[in-house]
Image (cartoon, rainbow, N blue to C red):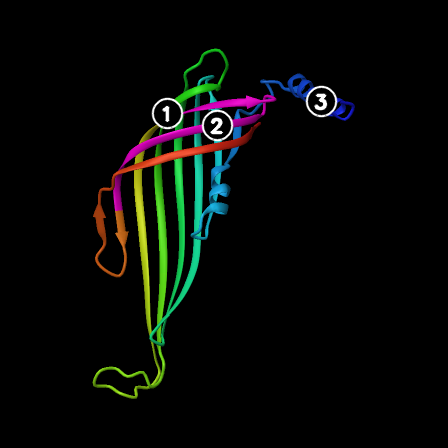
Amino acid sequence: MKKVTPILFLLLSFSAFAQKTDSTKKQLGLVVKGDILMPIYSLVNTDHYKIHSFTVEKLFSKRHSLQLTVLSLTQNTKSVKEYNNITNTNQMNFSSLAIIPEYKFFVSKKKNHTGYYVGAFAQYLYDIGKIASTQFIPAGYSFPYYPNTPAVTYYDNTEIIYQRLAIGLMNGIQYYLFNHLVIDCLVGIGPVGTIVQKGSGTPNTYIDPLVPRAAINIGYKF
């Protein structure tokens, strides 16, 4: 009990100090956040993804806010397979950038920019993938009608660019701890406008189904 008391005293003192020194007049109404789902997903996935998220939110007019989220994803994988003395090597480099502007309207009138909110979002996604394939056939490998062939290596490089624009609706809950620490949980969904895919062949434009939007953001309010 003697060890717990000083820790509890420090926590209570910090809480009282934060509430005492906080002044809404000095606040900028600016919130900086990061999505904690992204690093967790990067750790548990088996596809070697690295994902980063950064969000800036501007609070205004007591019940409204605008925020901008930027997501980046990279993946680098290499696989080597051998079959009948033929070695196939595939190297894939993939990167993705998503820009998501959002509008939020807070339903509650009791406290500014707190509690349940509804809103809308747009999402622009730009993906680029590069695949380099190599096939090595050793010397002396016998093809039909071509015995005793020399060693040969075949190369194949492919690049695919994928762009998507989506607009949807969302809702969520946002709360503050010690007046500055922000917790924001949101989910949303919306249809895709246009998708353009470019590669080695003819560019394709088509419509995709619904795009989900989900985040658990933790940040700081200035």
For the residues labelled 1 and 2, the Cα–Cα distance comes to: 13 Å
Q: Which label sits in the foreground, 1 or 3?
A: 3
Q: Residue at x 22, y 48 (%)?
A: 205
Q: Residue at x 52, y 27 (%)?
A: 183
Q: Position of residue 132 (x, y in %)?
A: 36, 65
SS at mark 1? strand
Q: Is residue 195 left or right of residue 219?
A: left
* Residue annotated with mark 2: 184
The amino acid sitting under disc 1 is Gly
Callout 1: 10 Å neighbours few (<14), some, many (20+)?
Answer: some
Is 200 in front, or is 139?
A: 139
Q: Residue furthest bottom?
A: 148
Residue 127 in magenta? Answer: no
* Residue annotated with mark 1: 119
* Residue annotated with mark 3: 8
For the residues labelled 1 and 3, the Cα–Cα distance comes to: 39 Å
SS at mark 2? strand
Q: Position of residue 114 (x, y in %)?
A: 49, 19
Q: Quadrant of the C terminus?
A: top right
The amino acid sitting under disc 3 is Leu
Q: Is residue 29 left or right of residue 108?
A: right
Q: Residue at x 30, y 44 (%)?
A: 164
Q: Which label sits in the foreground, 1 or 2?
A: 2
Q: Earlier in the sequence, mark 1 or mark 3?
A: 3
The amino acid sitting under disc 2 is Asp
Q: Is residue 62 above or below residue 38?
A: above
Residue span colored magenta: 171-195
